[in-house]
Image (spheres, helix red, strand yellow):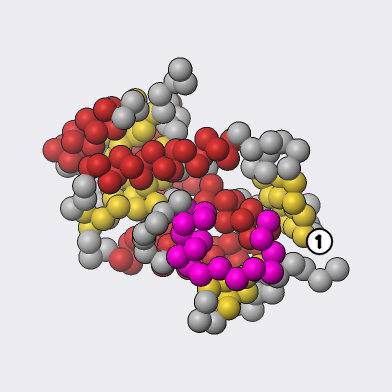
């Protein structure tokens, strides 16, 4: 039997945190609860989790800053908890590298399913054969090592950015809608299309010479996005 995944839950609402803990433990996960950003960062450093469930509204260091600091040192998947009206914070969290989000009030069962889905993709990515590499001119992706480089310099990609880049590189010249990308890359059959928009924007900032005029990840108006291989 594989060891249970460790999920760090960061929420100052003890009632919500306890409900989340019970659902995740029922699913076989080991759960660590903390109530503020400072304790979250200390816990993540001392006992690195497999996934973080992070409320954005925290006392002291807020969730966005916690996400920013986690991303400096780790690619650990992050699922944000946001209030229904916090669209700007949600987008900011995605821009910082969060992998997923659930809006409050939420179904604990839905959150548990999201946790399982993100962890499943992370495990599958880690099991990718080491020999698989994809290159496009000066852009090289090593699926086994979970690394990508541009002109010999490693790119600081989050887990989801790496998955999106790998998908684009392995499907060159094909146009995909945002809904198709949500399903093929995120594994969602429903969700907010702005998640895709934000991740594409972040990816362009890392692989395009001029992100405002992309030549690799191009917009197909009325459809979505297409990856155009670099001209040799």
Would residue 1 be found to the left or right of residue 59 on screen? right
Judged from this view, the residue extending furthest toward the left is 15
Position of residue 187 measured from the top left corner of the image (x, y, whole percent): 45, 51
Q: In the image, what residue occupies the spot 18% across and 33% down?
A: 18
Which residue position holds label 1? 137
- Residue 227 in the image, given as x and y percentages of width and height: 66, 67
Q: Is residue 175 magenta?
A: yes
- For this orientation, the residue located farthest to the bottom is 221
Residue 125's place in the image compared with 195, above or below, is above
Give the residue drawn at x 18%, y 36%. 19
Q: Nearer the viewer, residue 177 or 41?
A: 177
Local secondary structure at mark 1? loop
What x and y, as percent, mark residue 51? 41, 37
Q: Quadrant of the C terminus?
A: bottom right
- Please identify the quarter of the rendering in which residue 125 is found: top right
Part of the protein shown in magenta: 170-186
Please give the name of the residue rendered at 51% of the width and 39% of the height, measured from the top-left corner: 122
Does residue 99 appear to the left or right of 154 in the view shown? left
| Res. 146 image quadrant | top right
Asked whether 182 or 7 is in front, the reply is: 182
Task: Name, please, the residue furthest toward the right.
Answer: 232
Question: Quick one: quadrant of the N terminus?
Answer: top left
Neighbor class of circle 1 (other Cα within 10 Å; few <14, some 14-19, many 20+) is few
Whether residue 48 is visible: yes
Compared with 49, 155 (above or below) is: below
Q: Residue at x 26, y 63 (%)?
A: 86
Q: Is residue 211 above or below residue 96?
A: below
Q: Is residue 8 left or right of residue 187?
A: left
Residue 61 counted in the magenta span: no
Looking at the picture, how far across and down is residue 46, in whole percent? 43, 26
| Camera sees residue 56 | no
Horizontal side of residue 6 vs 12, given as left or right: right
């Amino acid at each position: 039997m594989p060891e249970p995944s460790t999920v760090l839950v960061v929420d100052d609402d003890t009632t919500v945190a306890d409900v989340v803990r019970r659902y995740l433990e029922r699913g076989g996960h080991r759960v660590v609860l903390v109530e503020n950003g400072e304790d979250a960062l200390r816990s993540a450093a001392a006992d690195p989790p497999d996934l973080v469930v992070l409320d954005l509204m925290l006392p002291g260091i807020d969730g966005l800053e916690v996400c920013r600091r986690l991303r400096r040192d780790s690619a650990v998947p992050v699922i944000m908890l946001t209030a229904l009206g916090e669209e700007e914070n949600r987008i900011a969290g995605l821009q910082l590298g969060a992998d997923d989000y659930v809006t409050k009030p939420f179904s604990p069962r839905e959150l548990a399913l999201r946790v399982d889905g993100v962890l499943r993709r992370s495990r599958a990515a880690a099991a990718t054969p080491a020999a698989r590499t994809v290159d496009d001119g000066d852009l090289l992706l090593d699926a086994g090592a979970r690394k990508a480089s541009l002109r010999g310099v490693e790119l600081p990609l989050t887990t989801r950015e790496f998955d999106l880049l790998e998908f684009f590189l392995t499907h060159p010249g094909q146009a995909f809608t945002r809904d198709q990308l949500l399903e093929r890359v995120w594994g969602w059959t429903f969700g907010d299309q702005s998640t895709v928009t934000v991740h594409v924007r972040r990816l362009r900032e890392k692989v395009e010479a001029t992100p405002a005029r992309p030549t690799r990840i191009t917009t197909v108006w009325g459809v979505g996005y297409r990856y155009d291989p670099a001209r040799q």
